[in-house]
Image: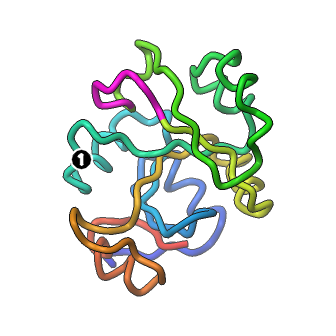
Amino acid sequence: MSQVVIDRMAVLAALKNGAVGIMATDTIYGVVVCAAHKAAVARLYELKHRKNKPGTIIAASIHDLARLGIPLRYMRAVEQYWPGSISIVVPSVPALRYLDQGKGSLAVRVPADKSLREFLMQTGPLLTSSANHPAEAPATTHEQAQNYFGEECRFLR
């Protein structure tokens, strides 16, 4: 890895400045970026060779998803499933087309893991994609995630 940042404050600063990183999410290890940072989102999709296959947006609350631009009415209709490991696909809006890769929809989740939600309160919504290359198994350890993307990512958390 070119520069591993593990300090929480440094990770927060790196994300806000558009860094791509690796971290454990509530379901798997993921490559993550700040969902509101358009250039970082583009880098994540390029790194993952993603075309027409958007990642998942995780957030601390439905209100954080609404602040990102997802209509609150969509979140109210599914909030009974959260916090939890269920991702819900909702319609996208024009302002978020950079996230949906032309699909017209977004997968969103409010994770069950309390410490992850506390982290997300500080970062805002993150776009995530599994830490693996196409057709390869998702990483289940820090080491596997680092082997996939170590040189391209700014931090490992």
Q: Residue at left 30%, top 71%?
A: 149
**Which is nearer the eye, 49 or 39?**
49
Q: Does the magenta stretch include residue 105?
A: yes
Vertical comparison of 129 with 24: above or below: above
Q: Nearer the viewer, residue 39 or 47?
A: 47
Tell me which amino acid carries mark 1.
Arg
Q: Is residue 108 magenta?
A: no
**Range covered by the magenta-colored residues:** 100-106
Q: Mark 1 points at which residue?
A: 50
Left or right: 104 in relation to 156 = left
Residue at screen point 41% across, 12% down: 94
Q: Where is residue 118 in the image (x, y as percent from the top left)?
A: 77, 55
- Residue 138 lies, in percent from the top left, at 38, 71
Observer-nearest residue: 68 or 153? 68
Residue beneath the point at 75% across and 56% down: 112
Q: Residue 4 location, x and y as percent?
A: 44, 76
Confirm whether residue 76 shows in the render. Answer: yes
Can see residue 10?
Answer: no
Q: Determine which quarter of the picture holds residue 52.
A: top left
Q: Position of residue 8 (x, y in %)?
A: 65, 66
